[in-house]
Image (cartoon, helix red, strand yellow):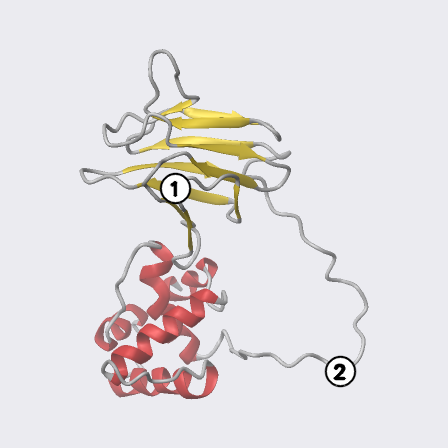
Amino acid sequence: MAADGTVLLQGERSASGTLWLNPGQEATFGRGTESRPVDFPLVHPEVSRLAGAVTAVQDFWLLTNHSHDATLVVENPEGGGEFVKVAPGRAAAPIPFEFARVVLPVAVGQCAFLVFAPQHSFVDRDRPREGEPTLSMFSLDETAKYFLVLVALCEPRLRDCASTVIPTVPQILDRIGATDLTRAGVNFHIDYLARTKLRVRHDGEAGKADWQRASLVSIALRFDLVREEHLKLLDG
């Protein structure tokens, strides 16, 4: 992460170089022209001359889309598939990711660049607690076998936020590599997670097993129940 409120733009694919921004500074990006160059050039021929701008703020950053018809997508490479869409003409949209990939829509190849922002600030959570304890919506035991199954389900999305792969039961079994677990055992843990722990509901439009696995991944990643650091459980 960048420090002291600075924001770093780093080239990826059709972008090149790096650019540092201090709080309050703005950098335009796009193809640019000789008479009106941009601060962070993108060489892809399908990118607008002035595609957008990044503005550094104290502990977050803003994205402006100068395009007339192209939506910008900001992905969180460290998350579970989270992304933000910035519509054409939208000014100063706040982006919540400390590390992000800005993707520009192109028909041929890919065009994107990375943004490293400052670490977010947080409130003091050590304040005295009063009253009855708050009940936990999702109570998961990270040492249990069912949690290992859940991590294996989420692994493709954790490693690549754009992945649409949902592991099958045999793939989960192979990934976990436990000698005391069978296919029936994996199915039992998936059903237990769906019915008792995360309480997903069948919508009736897809096969039960497929829908259960996809819903478990969606909920687990949406609420950060499974995070990148949990992948070490599979490697262990």
Judging depth in this view, the residue of 190 and 231 nearest the camera is 190
Tell me which amino acid carries mark 2. Glu
Name the residue located 31 percent from the left edge and 54 percent from the top edge: 162
Name the residue located 37 percent from the left edge and 84 percent from the top edge: 189
Residue at the extreme top: 35
Specify the label residue 88 is tagged with: 1
Judging depth in this view, the residue of 122 and 227 nearest the camera is 122
Examine the image and state in which quarter residue 157 appears. Answer: bottom left
Judging depth in this view, the residue of 178 and 18 nearest the camera is 18
Which element type, helix, strand or loop, lies under badge 1?
Answer: loop
Name the residue located 37 percent from the left edge and 70 percent from the top edge: 217
Which element type, helix, strand or loop, lies under badge 2?
Answer: loop
Work out whether mark 1 precedes mark 2 in sequence or the reverse, and give the earlier one. 1
Tell me if residue 178 can be seen: no
Examine the image and state in which quarter residue 187 appears. Answer: bottom left
Counting from the top left corner in percent of width and height, residue 110 is at 25, 38
Name the residue located 32 percent from the left edge and 41 percent from the top edge: 70
Residue 82 drawn above or below residue 193: above
Tell me if residue 100 can be seen: yes
Examine the image and state in which quarter residue 129 appears. Answer: bottom right
Q: Which residue is mark 2?
A: 132
Counting from the top left corner in percent of width and height, residue 201 is at 38, 84
Counting from the top left corner in percent of width and height, residue 88 is at 39, 42
Residue 129 drawn above or below residue 1: below
Gap between marks 1 and 2, in whole Å?
48 Å
Tell me which amino acid carries mark 1. Pro
Question: How packed is label 1: few (under 14 Cα within 10 Å), some, or many (20 or more)?
Answer: some
Question: Which marked residue is nearer to the observer: mark 1 or mark 2?
Answer: 1
Give the left or right position of residue 205, taking residue 161 as reference: left
Image quadrant containing the C terminus:
bottom left
Question: How packed is label 2: few (under 14 Cα within 10 Å), some, or many (20 or more)?
Answer: few
Counting from the top left corner in percent of width and height, residue 138 is at 53, 78
